[in-house]
Amino acid sequence: MVLLGILPLILCQVSFVITYSQDSSPVAEFSVNVYHHLRLSENEENIIYSPLSIALALGMVELGTHGTALKEIRHAMGYESLKSGDEFQFLRNLTQAITADESQCVVKLANSLFLQTGIHFSEKVLQLMKKYFHTDIENVDFQQSAAVAEHINKWVENHTENKINNLLSSEDFDQDTRLAVINAIYFRGNWKNQFRPEHTRTFSFTKDDGNEVQILMMYQQGDFYYGEFSDGTTEAGGVYQVLEMPYEREEMSMMIVLPRQEVPLATLEPIIKPQLIDEWANSVKKQKVEVYLPRFKVEQKIDLKNQLPKLGVRKIFEEGANLAFLNDSSGNNQNMYIGKAVQKSFFEVTEEGAEGAAASGMIALTRMLVLYPQVMADHPFFFIVRNRKTGAIIFMGRIMNPEVNEVNMHDFDAL
Ligand SMILES: *[C@@H]1O[C@H](CO)[C@@H](O)[C@H](O)[C@H]1NC(C)=O
Ligand SMILES: *[C@@H]1O[C@H](CO)[C@@H](O)[C@H](O)[C@H]1NC(C)=O
Ligand SMILES: *[C@@H]1O[C@H](CO)[C@@H](O)[C@H](O)[C@H]1NC(C)=O
């Protein structure tokens, strides 16, 4: 869902956001930091990743760390406010809260650890992995790189309803590879208020470089959580809109943050902080809103081995990491480090949460008669999918270009 557009700050009160000095909850700061690093490296591209999923992968790794490596992870994740070791229960609690009701919202999280065959695991670490993360642990022979890649890819497909394919390739492994931590996440929720496919039509989306692309724009007028914000300066481009659209049962929602049309998303992005996200969530008010949101599908593969060191998690990737995944008596831990850590995320937004609703459109855009706040996401926006109870961020990303390639849109305008 998304955002809005052009208009109208006609009606509404602007809430001035005060930055709190209170500590954010564990993982929150990390989630946002990852975003800031990604936006600086992904020029003008869509972004999608799952902070929760990275947190779980790192949690698994943390079970095998000590010393510097352990300190780095605890610091980067914001676990220093928790008693040592409590972060595992914290992560387990989070997972339970999020995956509790699978009938309404589908969050599929899959954790796995692939280890070089012929090496013995530490029973203790194995048990903790299973206890806290339900980790699938398997032995593979990384020398057979093509077969391992295929095997792991199959595992991932199995756990993501076939939405995530080809996660790894044979080049991802070499003879020094000892361990692969794989984390996949797949989410699909049905909107509490679904869009009607017959209201979807082609529409121009203006990218931040000024070019226009044709997209499928969904429309509805309904009750959503909405607010207009400003930090009181022009730094973030002035007033921007926040729209929170719940999924069924309102346990999860998607929050869309949209700058004014003439303001590039890059102007707004630097202000994003965990405390601000909480502030948005606490300040939006249920009211009638006209929503224009592109249908979109985003997919991204992130090399965590590139990204995590920027956040202070370095040691686990170095040869001297001495990860303690193995049975000590074998004396093989010495050269244990993480050879590969990737995340691939897939996320899509449609009228109802299911794919395939055909569009044919008849929405008259009466921009002159604005009865309700209008959120028109016809230019780049930032979004978050979060659990409303815990505040945990399942996905975070931005849409710079929602262009739909596979749909033939030629006849919609003719209607
Ligand atoms: C996990 O949940 C239990 C039960 O709700 C709670 O007692 C415990 O404090 C939580 N632990 C952490 C670290 O959040
Ligand atoms: C290591 O292996 C030995 C022999 O198989 C076993 O007795 C011991 O419990 C194992 N230790 C751990 C930490 O798994
Ligand atoms: C994937 O699922 C199929 C069918 O359930 C199963 O036979 C296969 O072993 C699974 N593969 C992996 C790698 O988990």
Image: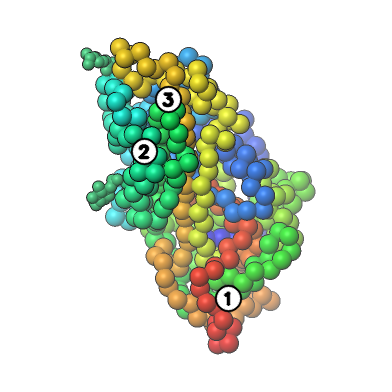
Q: How many marks can you see? A: 3
How far apart in space, not on screen, are marks 3 and 2 (Cα)? 27 Å
Quick one: label 1, few (<14), some, or many (20+) residues within 10 Å? many
Residue 342 horizontal/vertical position (percent): 48, 40
Res 144 label:
2
Please state which of the two labelled residues, at mark 3 or mark 1, is closer to the viewer: 3
- At horizontal 34% and vertical 20% (from top left) the residue drawn is 326
The secondary element bearing badge 2 is classed as loop
Q: Can residue 145 be seen in this view?
A: yes
Mark 3 sits on what residue? 62
Task: Give residue 414's mark.
Answer: none
Label 2 crowd (10 A; few <14 / some 14-19 / many >=20): few
Work out whether residue 121 or residue 358 is closer to the camera in this orientation and state it.
Answer: 121
State which mark lies toward you, 2 or 1. Answer: 2
308 sits left or right of 358 in the view: right
- Asked if the beta carbon under badge 1 is closer than 8 A to the nearest atom of ligand 3, the reply is no
User: 126 or 83: nearer the eye?
Assistant: 126
Q: Is mark 3 on a helix, strand or loop?
A: helix
The residue at the far right in this view is 234
Q: Position of residue 171 (x, y in %)?
A: 48, 41
Q: Where is residue 390 in the image (x, y as percent from the top left)?
A: 43, 40
* First reached walking from the N terminus: tag 3 or tag 1: 3
Q: Which residue is identified by label 1?
A: 202
Q: Residue at x 64, y 78 (%)?
A: 366
> Label 3 is placed on what type of residue?
Glu
